Every structure is written in structure tokens, then in C-alpha cells.
Image (spheres, grey):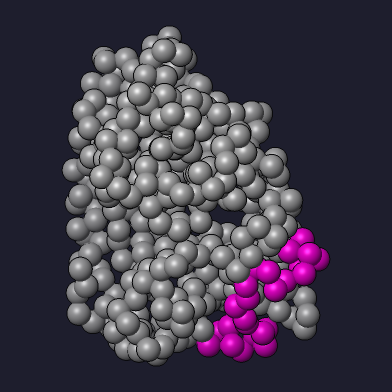
Amino acid sequence: MIEARFHDSIERIPTEAWDALRPDDNPFVSHAFLALLERTGCIRADWGWQAHHLGLYEDSHLVAAAPLYLKGNSHGEFVFDWSWASAWERAGGDYYPKLLNAVPYSPVPGPRLLAGNDARTVERQHALTAAMRSFAERMNLSSVHANFLRDDELAAFDTPWLVRSDVQFHWHNHAYANFAQFLAALNHKKRKNIRQERAHVARSGLAIEMRGGSSLSVEEWRHIHALYESTFDAKGNHAALTRSMFLGLRDTLGDSVQLALARHGERIVAMALFLQSSDTLYGRYWGAEVDVPGMHFELCYYQGIEHAIRHGLQRFEPGAQGEHKLARGFLPARTHSRHYLVNTSFRDAVHEALQREAEGMDDYAQELMQHSPYAHLEA
């Protein structure tokens, strides 16, 4: 018998048991990363996040798990369902709280159904999605959502889960020896533009470097967090990750965190923060206190590409949205989410809307590929 249990903190689940179920070393679903979010005040009910992690147990042994949250709003998810919430509430229902299978504040594709790698993986993946649906129905929730899924998890979200997809822009390493060889693969116009952008930064006189998280001092990490906050403040948005979270990245994840830095003397004046697995670099946050043309592209994209080439990483995923990434060597990649709406009439209405949305998304992705920056069209 499989028993489903829900936990109000990831720390109620042993680290070794959780991490043993991960199919790869994606850092965002590591016990350390999720625990750090909770421990440092990033997961708070007044911000709309309440941990509700799912574990499946056989004879008291954890055999499958999923990062789950009860959500009081739709902030920090990057798969937008505000219109669904508005429609359901206009009809007299309560859309929130809902149940979310995702990594907070992280539009990063990766494992969401942690079920190990053995003959029963698929069975346990289906058991996880069934447990989510059962919980939502039992607790009279409006819906369950699973965002940024891996391709090999999609089959576990069969009917009546609703299908949705979006487009991000990812860079792929074709065994480039160096950045110059990558540039040579681009068409002339894109190659020239990138060289010009990098030349602007070079003329600024600022020192550019890539550093592992553990090599930076506590004071440098505090300043990096201040730069991160300033980006959100400038746009009138809320910076969800606390200073304690950033300091915890240094102490907990070490050099799985990479930073592209611009310095004026010893002072860090701009930064881009990345997380890294054994084969992928993930771009996350940026901040600057100087206005240098091309600096954002240098730190957020070109330093990341150089780092990926230097360390033999296969992919670089710089984050959500941004058609401007296409001109800098990043190609469209589909991302996937699945959604279970408890009310059948509501589900049918959203299903029709998603079918129309899917047609538009297919056309959009195909059009993007017609504007590939590469001299020879890449798949």
C-alpha cells in the first residue's frame, strides 16, 4: 500500500531520502535549495506561499515526492492564470488557495515528480498526480497546477489535466572550443552586433570576472543582494528573496552558484547570478548600480556562454521570456505546464481557451525559428 502524506516544511523530510529520488542534479529541486527558501523567510503565507510537500510512503519509506505549495495568489509562478482566477471569482467561486507543483520564483524546467529511476518510476509518477488531484477534491480547492515540467513527466498528467505550453530561449553547446567559434556559427549581422556590445563594456574600464559563490566574502554577498533588490525597486516590484537567502546560497550551494561580476576597483558595481548543474547553467538574477551600454548582455548572456563553453556544459537557460535573447544565440524551446480544474464546467471552458492559445503558440514558435541568428538553421 502506498500512503500519501503532506508536509508543511521540507525539513520534515530527511535530506537523503528526498535527494535520492531526484532523477538528475537540477539544483532547484534539491532539498538544500528548497529548505533554504523556507528557512530564510522567502516562503511566507502573507506572500501567498505555504509549503505543503507531498511524500508517498511504502512501509514508512519515502518512495516518491513532489514540491508542493498552497498558493494564496499567483505571484512568483511565471505561468500566468490571473484571467482564470478572475473568471472563477466572478462566477462566485474561490480560486485561492490553489495547489502548486513547482519551484518558487523559478521559471526553470526540471523535475517536479521525484520518483527515482527504476521499474516503478512511471507508476509512482502517476500516484503523485493522483494524490494531488485527490487532495484538491477533498479540500474543495479550485485547482492544481504543475509548472515547468520535464518531458518524461508529461504522461503522468493525462486526462483530465489540461495542457499548456510556452516558449523560453535556450543556448546549446555544439562542442564549441571557445566564444570565437560560437560567434563564427552566427550570421554576419548578429556576430557584428555582439562584438560591438562587448566592445562597449571593454571600453568602460570595469573589470569583468566569473566567480564561484563560495569564493566571495559575506560583505560581497550582501552587496550582491542589494544590487538584486535595486533591480526590483527600479521597476516598482517586490524582491522576494531575502538577504539571508543569498548568504545561504554561499554557505549551502557553494560553487553550484556562479556570478558574473563587474568591478570598479574592488567594488562590485554589477552582477548576474546563476545556478549550475552538471550539464546546464541557469541564469536567474541581475543588478547594477552603473549604466554601461551592453553590460546587461555581457553579464547575463555572454559571460554565461563563455562559462558553459569553458566547463563543457551542454545548455544555458537564461530565464523566462525575452525575444532579445534570440539575436544573441538563444533559440526557442518549449516549456510545459499541466492544470487540473476541479469543476468540470470551468475545466471545459478553460480547455477551449487553451486550444486557441496553443495554436497561437505553435505559430509563434515556428515564426521565431525563421529568425534564427545562426548562419545555418539549427534544430
For residue 342, above or below residue 217: above
Left or right: residue 335 compared with residue 42:
left
**Residue at 53% in and 62% down:** 275
31 vs 42, left or right, is: left
The magenta segment is 199-223
Rendered view: 16 above or below 160: below
Residue 288 visible: yes
Residue 95 colored in magenta in the image: no
Q: Position of residue 204 (x, y in %)?
A: 65, 85
Look at the image and tell me in which quarter the C terminus lies. Answer: bottom left
The quarter of the rendered structure image containing the N terminus is top left
Q: Nearer the viewer, residue 11 or 187?
A: 11
Q: What is the tally of numbered marks visible in this picture?
A: 0
Q: Is residue 146 above or below residue 93?
A: below
Residue at 64% across, 28% down:
45
Residue 309 vertical position relative to residue 56 in the rendered view, above or below: below
Q: Quick one: which residue is furthest to the front in this view?
A: 59
Pinpoint residue 241: horizontal percent, then vertical percent: 65, 48
Return the x and y of residue 114 as percentages of the image width and height.
40, 43
Q: Residue at x 64, y 65 (%)?
A: 254
In x, y percent, where is residue 200? 56, 84
Image quadrant of residue 168?
bottom left
- Residue 202 is drawn in which quadrant? bottom right
Please give left or right for residue 217 compared with residue 367 in the image.
Answer: right
